[in-house]
Amino acid sequence: MKKTSTIWGFVFIAFGAVLLLNQFFPNNIINIEYLWPVFVLIPGLSMEIGYFSKKKNPGVLVPGGILTVIGILFFFEVFTDWRFSEYTWPFYLLSVAFGLLQLYLFSKRNKGLLIPIAILTVIALSSFLSMIFNNFLGWVDYSLVVPIIFILFGVYILAKEVIINNKKTRFKRVFLLLI
């Protein structure tokens, strides 16, 4: 039996099962309103499967990774009625970083790819952290945070200096006792 016919067999079974479930649930899942992300996800998965089955042309991993991540994100957004899109926008940046990371991992490991991967990832993660701080730590007065950080850093430097001087003083005492 061919591999492609097996895959198509499972696709038709899954599609039939979803159509059958659609008859029993009032939400009408099989609707273009909910399924349009398939048109983004399928090309992405096709590129991913195409590379991993033949191990040729790793360049398809970049658009494949981007489309796959964005397709999954679109499914999430559609089924949650876009309620979280205010918070999920950094995934668009991470999708590009994911595609480039796949290219880096499965090609000749061009170190130049690590720069855009790192930049995109840092921007996305700092955006997530910014949203978390703004939403969950809204009670914190940020005009006080920076001065407190400076004060703590100064205390750290002074404490480190005292510890170093105490070690030197102890060494001097031990040295003087030995003489």
Image (cartoon, grey):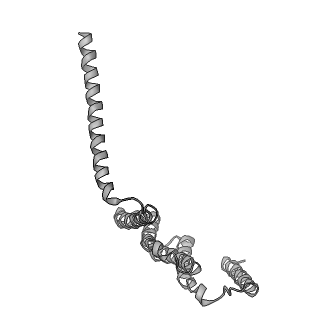
Q: Position of residue 148 (x, y in %)?
A: 31, 50
Q: Residue furthest bottom?
A: 32
Decide: is 130 above or below 157. Answer: below
Picture quadrant of residue 115: bottom left
Picture quadrant of residue 27: bottom right
User: Is residue 108 among the parts visible in the rendering?
Assistant: no
Q: Position of residue 34 (x, y in %)?
A: 60, 85
Q: Nearer the viewer, residue 106 or 99?
A: 99
Image side of residue 153 versus residue 91, left or right: left
Q: What residue sits 55% from the left and 83% below the top? A: 37
* Count of numbered badges drawn on the protein: 0
Image side of residue 18 versus residue 81, left or right: right
Image side of residue 119 versus residue 75, left or right: left
Q: What residue sits 26% from the left and 10% below the top? A: 178
The quadrant of the rendering that contains the C terminus is top left
Q: Position of residue 117 (x, y in %)?
A: 39, 66
User: Is residue 165 among the parts visible in the rendering?
Assistant: yes
The quadrant of the rendering that contains the N terminus is bottom right
Q: Position of residue 130 (x, y in %)?
A: 40, 65
Decide: is 17 above or below 140. Answer: below
Q: Nearer the viewer, residue 98 or 80?
A: 80
Q: Nearer the viewer, residue 132 or 173?
A: 132
